[in-house]
């Protein structure tokens, strides 16, 4: 669990409503720098969104569009993510990161111990590069044709008290 | 476990009683906006409910109504949910949220480190979208229905009387 600030921009936080901003995009394998539409991870509500974590998942399909069952265990090693804070244009990842390398192994969640708060019209730009998903296994696994990248930012919408915190 | 506040609405919390509010419904493939019965997740007790997590589990059935054994491993990639806080009218998801990208792998729950407290007649509205259930390689028994099992888990809280010092 990350830090739970008592204030945001001088206003006292009196209530938090759990909130997720999720989006997904389906693409072919071996594609480079596919960017999610800006609206997908753009916060459009009046209450600020205090982001505590990001989750990256991928689901693979065969050429007919059927989901592969079971999913390969190596999927998180086969695609890379780049994230940028749209409000400040500051990269959250300095270069391409494999999903496998983001987050604790047991949780597979990127935890922001210091939460990052975004306001209305703020958000994230997320880009994806996919590998070829070829895996050598016995018996052979179903060939991957398309992959759905699923990204979620988790946290809380903030509700403030009427009174502003006094200046120190 | 998340934070355990000392107070609610300005009054000391003196006791917590573990409590779960649960409900389930079964859905065929390719459905959108299926709202689970609203009484399932409406809180009807006098004591406030401090919710610490939402648990969503899925169970697959074949056409004859039998539970599949073993269960497919990709169920949570086929179902999306939306949750609305009826106390404030606020949506708790920007868009339909796929279960596979909602939960930590090891816990399989949506943890609310900052608990959300609801009072009598408040609660949550949960709606469900399902995708196609087909899978490859084709299994011996196809999945034809998925039971969505939702639990809001936390504590009923007992708060100190208004006149604490007598």
Image: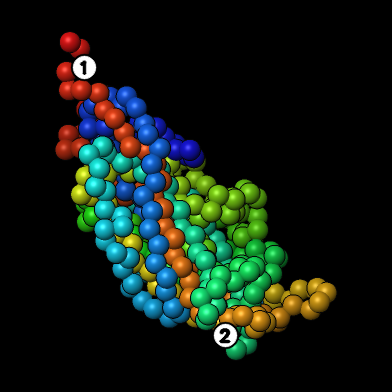
Horizontal placement of A9 versus A113: left or right? Answer: left
Which residue is the site of mark 1? B164
Indicate the chain on which mark 2 is placed: A
Which residue is the site of mark 2? A65
Quadrant location of residue B49? top left
Q: Position of residue B7 (x, y in %)?
A: 29, 28
Q: Residues within 10 Å of mark 1 (few under 14, many from 20)?
A: few
Indicate the chain on which mark 1 is placed: B
Residue A156 can be seen, yes or no: yes
Q: Residue furthest right?
A: A138
Gap between marks 1 and 2 measured at Cα: 64 Å
Residue A119 can be seen, yes or no: no
Horizontal placement of B80 versus A141: left or right? Answer: left
Q: Residue furthest top?
A: B166
Q: Nearer the viewer, residue A165 or A139?
A: A139
Q: Residues within 10 Å of mark 2 (few under 14, many from 20)?
A: some
Q: Are marks 1 and 2 on the same chain?
A: no
| Residue appearing at x 33%, y 73% in the figure | B33
> Residue B68 bears which disc, if any?
none
Q: Position of residue B22 (x, y in %)?
A: 38, 53
| Residue appearing at x 52%, y 47% in the figure | A111
Q: Position of residue A28 (x, y in %)?
A: 59, 81
| Residue appearing at x 25%, y 43% in the figure | B45
Q: Is residue B163 above or below residue A76?
A: above
Q: Which dot, 1 or 2, sits closer to the camera? A: 1
Label 2: which secondary element:
loop
Q: Is residue A81 above or below residue B28?
A: above
């Amino acid at each position: 669990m990350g830090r739970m600030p008592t204030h945001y921009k001088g206003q006292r936080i009196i209530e938090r409503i759990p909130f997720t901003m999720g989006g997904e995009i389906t693409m072919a394998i071996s594609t480079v720098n596919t960017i999610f539409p800006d609206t997908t991870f753009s916060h459009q509500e009046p209450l600020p969104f205090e982001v505590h974590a990001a989750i990256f998942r991928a689901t693979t399909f065969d050429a007919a569009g059927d989901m592969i069952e079971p999913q390969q265990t190596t999927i998180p090693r086969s695609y890379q993510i780049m994230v940028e804070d749209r409000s400040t244009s500051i990269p959250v990842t300095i270069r391409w990161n494999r999903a496998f390398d983001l987050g604790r192994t047991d949780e597979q969640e990127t935890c922001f111990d210091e939460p990052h708060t975004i306001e209305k019209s703020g958000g994230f730009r997320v880009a994806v590069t996919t590998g070829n998903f070829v895996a050598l296994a016995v018996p052979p696994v179903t060939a991957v044709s398309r992959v759905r990248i699923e990204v979620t930012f988790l946290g809380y919408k903030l509700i403030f008290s009427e009174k502003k915190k006094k200046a120190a | 476990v998340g934070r355990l506040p000392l107070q609610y609405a300005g009054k000391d919390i003196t006791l917590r009683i573990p409590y779960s509010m649960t409900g389930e419904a079964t859905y065929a493939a390719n459905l959108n906006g299926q709202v689970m019965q609203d009484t399932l997740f409406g809180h009807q007790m006098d004591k406030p409910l401090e919710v610490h997590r939402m648990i969503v589990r899925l169970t697959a059935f074949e056409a004859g109504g039998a539970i599949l054994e073993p269960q497919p491993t990709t169920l949570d990639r086929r179902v999306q949910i939306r949750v609305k806080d009826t106390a404030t009218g606020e949506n708790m998801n920007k868009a339909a949220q796929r279960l596979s990208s909602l939960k930590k792998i090891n816990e399989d729950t949506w943890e609310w480190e900052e608990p959300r407290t609801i009072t009598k007649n408040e609660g949550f509205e949960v709606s469900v979208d399902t995708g196609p259930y087909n899978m490859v390689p084709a299994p011996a028994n196809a999945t034809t229905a998925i039971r969505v099992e939702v639990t809001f888990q936390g504590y009923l809280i007992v708060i100190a009387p208004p006149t604490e010092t007598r």
